[in-house]
C-alpha cells in the first residue's frame, strides 16, 4: 500500500465512521445538564460562542477504531457504536481537564472551556462526560456491555496515571526513556488500545481477537506519540497548528529529547544543560537545541521506534482472523496517523 | 423511639458498617496510581501529611445506607459491599473537586488536597476515584452489577448538575425556593438516594423495594440539607466545625435564607437588601441578618420542612416489606442525621 492509497483509505474510513458516530454522540451530549451541554457542544466544535454552528469536531480517530473493531469481529459498525461514543466522551473528558491543568487557553485556535467559562465549568463538564461515557456503554444492547464499561474505566485510570506522570516529569531532570514511554502508554496508548478493542468486545469476539486489536491500538498509540513528539520539534506550524519548535520552547521532556539526553554523548549533555538553564527563547537558540536533539540521535531513534511500533501493530493484526477489508482499513488508518511529515 | 435510642442504634449501625466497608475501601484505594493513592489516603483520613496514621475518616453514612439496603432485601451486608465502596468513592470524588471549585483550603481542620498538592492533583485524584467507583461496582459478584453501576453514573451526573446550579446561584439574586430544593436534590439527595438503593439492587430486590429505599434516601437527603443549612446559621461552631454564622458570612443563598427572602415580607426584603449589600461581617451585623431570616419565617419553615421530609422518608419504608431490625436501623440512622441541634 502506497502512502497516498493509505491516506485515501483512511480519509474515507474516518468520514464514514464520523457519519455513524456523530448522531450517537449528539444524542448522548443532549442528555447532559444545560451548562455541561452548552460547554461540551462548544468544545466538540458543534457550536461557536455566539451560538452559531461550529465547523465540526476533530478527526474522531478513537470512534473510528471502535467501529472498525466491531467490524473486525464480523459485526456491523453499529454494534460498536456505544463503544465509539464512550471512547470519544472519555477522550474529551480528558481534554477538558488537561487543558485546565496545563493552563492552555487555546485548542485548535479556539478558546478552551476553562478559559471561557472558568475552571469549575471545565471540571464539572469533564466529570459529566466521564460519567456519561460509562452510562452510554452500559446501555448497549450487548451481553458484554458491562465488560466493555469495565475496560473503559480501567483505561481511564491508566490515562490519569499517564497525565499525573507527565505533570510530575516537568519537575524532574532525570526522567529515563522507559519512564517516558510508560507515561505515553498511559496518556496516549491506553485509550487508543481500548478504542481498538471495545467494538469487538461488544460484538462478543474471542480473547485472541480482542487481545490482538488491543495490541494494535497500544502500539499505534506509542507510534503516534513518537510522531507527535517529532512534530512538536520539527513540525510545520501551518500543519500542526502549534508555534515553530513549540515543544522546545516549553522545555518539554518529550521522547526524542529524553533519548538524546540519555544516549546522546556530548550533545546530550549540552542538551541537558540547556533544558535546565535559563536561556532565552529566541529562534536561533531553539534551533540550536533542536540540532542537539538531532546530533544526540533523538530524531533518528524516535523515527525508527515509531516505525518499529507500527510494524508491531500490523504484526498483531496479521496473527488473527478478520475480514480483509477491515484489516486493510485498520492498517491504512494506522499508517495515515503515523506517516505524517517531520 | 426516643432521640437517645435512635442515636445509640445509629451509632452502633455506623460503627458496624464502617468495620465492613473500610477493608473494601482500602483495597480499592490500594489499586490507584501512587500519586492518587497518597492523596486519597490523606483525604480519607488514613494518613497524615508526615506519613503517620490518620484519625480515620468520616461517619461513612453512604456506605452504611448501602449495606443496610442489602439487608433490607434479605441479603447479607456483604452483598452490598461493592455498592458501599462505590458510593463512598463517588462521595469523595465530589469532595475533592468541590473543595477546589469552592476554593476551600480546609476540610475538618485539615488542608484540602488541592491546597496541599495543587489543583491538577485534586482534579486527577478525583477523576481516578470516580473511575474506580464504577470499576469496583462492575466487579461485584451479582447479575445486577451493571444496573447498579448505571444507577451510580446517572447519579453522578445529578450530583454534577446540583453543583453546577449551586455555583450559578452564587451569581444570581432571584433564586426561588423550588430551584434551591432542586439543586439540593442533585447535590445532596441523589447520592443518598442511590446509596439507600444500591445494596438492594445488587441483591436483586424487586422494583417496589428499591423504589421505596430510593425515596427514603432522597427524602433523607432533603431533610439533611435543610438541617445542614439551619446549622450553617444557628449551629454551634464547636459541633459544626465551622465559624459561627458561617453561611451568612459567605452570603450563601441557603434554603432558610431563600425562603425568608421570598416569603418573609418586610424582613425578607431587608434580608435581600443585606445579601446584595456591601456590609461588613461583624458579628452584630451577622446576628441581625440571622434575626431577619428568623422573623421572615425561614427558620421555622426549614425546621418544619425537614420534619416533613423525614416523615415522607419513613412513610416510604412503611409501605414495603423488609426485616424489622433493618427498618428500625434505617429509621434510627435517618433520625440521628436530622435530629441535630439547631
Image (tube, coloured by chain):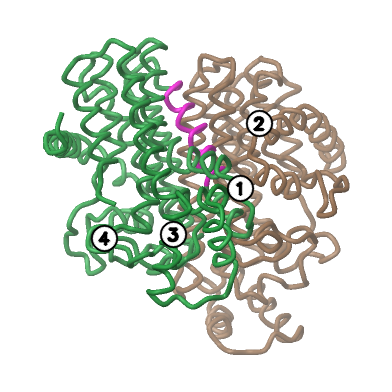
Chain colours: A green, B brown
Residue B311 occupies quadrant: top right
Viewer-nearest residue: B146 or B304? B146
Q: Mark 4 against mark 3, which lies toward the viewer? A: 4
Give the chain letter at badge 3.
A
Which chain does the numbered disc 2 sit on? B
Residue matched to label 4: A236
Residue B218 visible: no
Q: Is there CB contact under 8 Å for labels 1 and 4? A: no
Secondary structure category for the residue under label 4: loop
- Residue placed under numbered mark 2 in the picture: B84
Looking at the rendered image, the disc whose residue lies closer to the viewer, 1 or 3, is 3
Give the labeled residue for mark 3: A99
- What subunit carries mark 4? A
Vertical position of residue B151 compared to residue B114: above or below: above
The magenta stretch is A146-162
Kind of element beneath mark 2? helix
- Check if mark 4 and mark 2 are on a common chain: no
- Residue A7 in percent (x, y) is at 15, 39
If the image is split into quadrants, where does the N terminus of chain B sit? top right
Amino acid at each position: 500500500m502506497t502512502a497516498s492509497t493509505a491516506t485515501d483509505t483512511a480519509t474515507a474510513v474516518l468520514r464514514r465512521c464520523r457519519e455513524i458516530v456523530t448522531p450517537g454522540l449528539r444524542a448522548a451530549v443532549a442528555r447532559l445538564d444545560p451548562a455541561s451541554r452548552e460547554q461540551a457542544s462548544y468544545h466538540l466544535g458543534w457550536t461557536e460562542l455566539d451560538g452559531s454552528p461550529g465547523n465540526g469536531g476533530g478527526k474522531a480517530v478513537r470512534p473510528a477504531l471502535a467501529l472498525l473493531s466491531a467490524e473486525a469481529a464480523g459485526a456491523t459498525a453499529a454494534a460498536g457504536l456505544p463503544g465509539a461514543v464512550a471512547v470519544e466522551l472519555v477522550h474529551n473528558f480528558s481534554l477538558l481537564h488537561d487543558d485546565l491543568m496545563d493552563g492552555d487557553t487555546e485548542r485548535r485556535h479556539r478558546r478552551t472551556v476553562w478559559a471561557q467559562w472558568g475552571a469549575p465549568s471545565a471540571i464539572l463538564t469533564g466529570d459529566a462526560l466521564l460519567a456519561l461515557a460509562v452510562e452510554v456503554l452500559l446501555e448497549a444492547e450487548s451481553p458484554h456491555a458491562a465488560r466493555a464499561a469495565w475496560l473503559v474505566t480501567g483505561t481511564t485510570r491508566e490515562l490519569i496515571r499517564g497525565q499525573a506522570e507527565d505533570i510530575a516529569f516537568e519537575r524532574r531532570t532525570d526522567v529515563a526513556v522507559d519512564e517516558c514511554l510508560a507515561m505515553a502508554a498511559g496518556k496516549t496508548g491506553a485509550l487508543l488500545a481500548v478504542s481498538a478493542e471495545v467494538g469487538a468486545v461488544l460484538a462478543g469476539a474471542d480473547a485472541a481477537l480482542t487481545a490482538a486489536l488491543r495490541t494494535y491500538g497500544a502500539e499505534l498509540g506509542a507510534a503516534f506519540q513518537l510522531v507527535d513528539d517529532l512534530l512538536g520539534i520539527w513540525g510545520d506550524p501551518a500543519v500542526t497548528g502549534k508555534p515553530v519548535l513549540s515543544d522546545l520552547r516549553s522545555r518539554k521532556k518529550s521522547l526524542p529529547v529524553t533519548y538524546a539526553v540519555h544516549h546522546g554523548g556530548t550533545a546530550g549533555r549540552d542538551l541537558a544543560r540547556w533544558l535546565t538553564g535559563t536561556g532565552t527563547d529566541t529562534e536561533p537558540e531553539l534551533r540550536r537545541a533542536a540540532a542537539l536533539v538531532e546530533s544526540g540521535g533523538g530524531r533518528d531513534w524516535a523515527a525508527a521506534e515509531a516505525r518499529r511500533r507500527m510494524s508491531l501493530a500490523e504484526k498483531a493484526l496479521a496473527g488473527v482472523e478478520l475480514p480483509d477489508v477491515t484489516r486493510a482499513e485498520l492498517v491504512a488508518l494506522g499508517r495515515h496517523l503515523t506517516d505524517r511529515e517531520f
